Image (cartoon, rainbow, N blue to C red):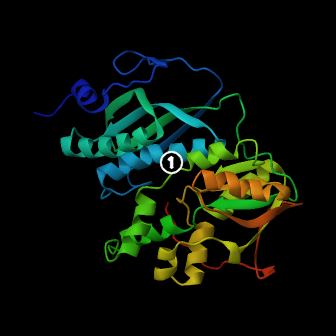
Amino acid sequence: MSLGEFQIIQRFFALGNDDPDVLLDIGDDAAVVQPSGPLALVTDTLVEGVHFSSQTAADVVGYRTLAVNLSDLAAMGAQPRWCTLALTIPDSNEGWLEGFTSGFFRLAKIYGVSLVGGDLTRGTLSTTLHLIGAVGDGAFLTRGGGQVGDDIYVTGSLGDAAAGLVLIDDGVADESDAHRALAERFSRPLPRIAAGRALVGLASAAIDVSDGLLADLGHLCKSSGCGAVIDVENLPFSVEMLALFPPQTAQAYALNGGDDYELCFTAPAEKADEVKAVLGVAETTVHRIGELVAGEGVESRRDGAPFNQTDTGHQHF
């Protein structure tokens, strides 16, 4: 006999928490939390057939449901606290639910996120997460603070997720350690919460790289009222990327691929040493890739000359 709605909630989601600021969680008409200051709120929806395929493992769906929202909070410099989950599933497949909650709660534990409520219904598989973070004394990052002359940075490496998705779609994700590493970067991205927190008060603007560097940097530029020039020879690539793909393909994935969930941010040029120092403490690599300029839009250069990427990389949607 299949499980009913309340049986699913009690068995898989009502696990309790030890957060003293949660006054009432799963099991009532609403959750009650006790914030001590300003909050950042984000929401994201993942839909089968749009954001992931029907073949995607349940634990990956659970992990990414939380990870993509955590990345938004990272770009704001916020500390994750609480979330609510609206889950639509076609049936009460216990194996799938075990996998989903395994991936979800594993990541929630790492970042101290308490699931305090939500909704469960039958239908086409989709997940919607509402995530709440604290911004301490009200200091946080936005897309809109960049100034002409600021340096542009990215954390980590770029293009890995787009390359990993290609390997997954081609059925070759397990061929070597390098293949598996890139596939893992797509399936289980690492939200840069510590980096975002470290950059509060230092970065002038920030955004997470979810739709591709060019697109997301373009959003930052529009909000900041600036243009940008980036030097593609300074784009950071992983050793796995360079082992499996030629430089031109790596550049295409880095510029347009998306799903990396790294941070792209700006800071005054005189803060370069401080940027490296605080991100070193946060155990996050960082690379300067360009600068904000007067005007609008993003211009790419290679060795000082205009560079137009003709290969747009893998399209996710």
Residue 265 visible within the image: no
Near-viewer residue (190 or 277): 277
285 left or right of 88 in image: right
Is residue 290 positioned above or below 118 on the image?
below
Is residue 95 positioned above or below 183 on the image?
above
Question: Splitting the image into 4 quarters, where does residue 306 fall?
Answer: bottom right
Q: How many marks?
A: 1
Residue 66 image position (x, y, % from top left): 45, 43
Name the residue at 54% across, 17% down: 34
Near-viewer residue (125 or 303): 303
Given the current orientation, which residue lies at the most extreme left position?
Answer: 1
Q: Amino acid at mark 1?
A: Val
Name the residue at 49% across, 53% down: 190
Residue 242 image position (x, y, % from top left): 52, 80
- According to the picture, the residue beneath numbered tag 1 turns out to be 68
Name the residue at 54% across, 84% down: 246
Is residue 242 positioned above or below 107 on the image?
below
180 left or right of 161 in image: left
Mark 1: few/some/many CA within 10 Å (<14, 14-19, 20+): many
Question: Splitting the image into 4 quarters, where does residue 165 fall?
Answer: bottom left
Pick the quarter of the image with the N terminus.
top left
208 left or right of 95 in image: right
Mark 1 element type: helix
Is residue 23 positioned above or below 118 on the image?
above
Question: Splitting the image into 4 quarters, where does residue 49 fall?
Answer: bottom left
Residue 242 visible within the image: yes
Residue 7 image position (x, y, % from top left): 21, 26
Residue 193 image position (x, y, % from top left): 57, 45
Name the residue at 50% across, 34% down: 130
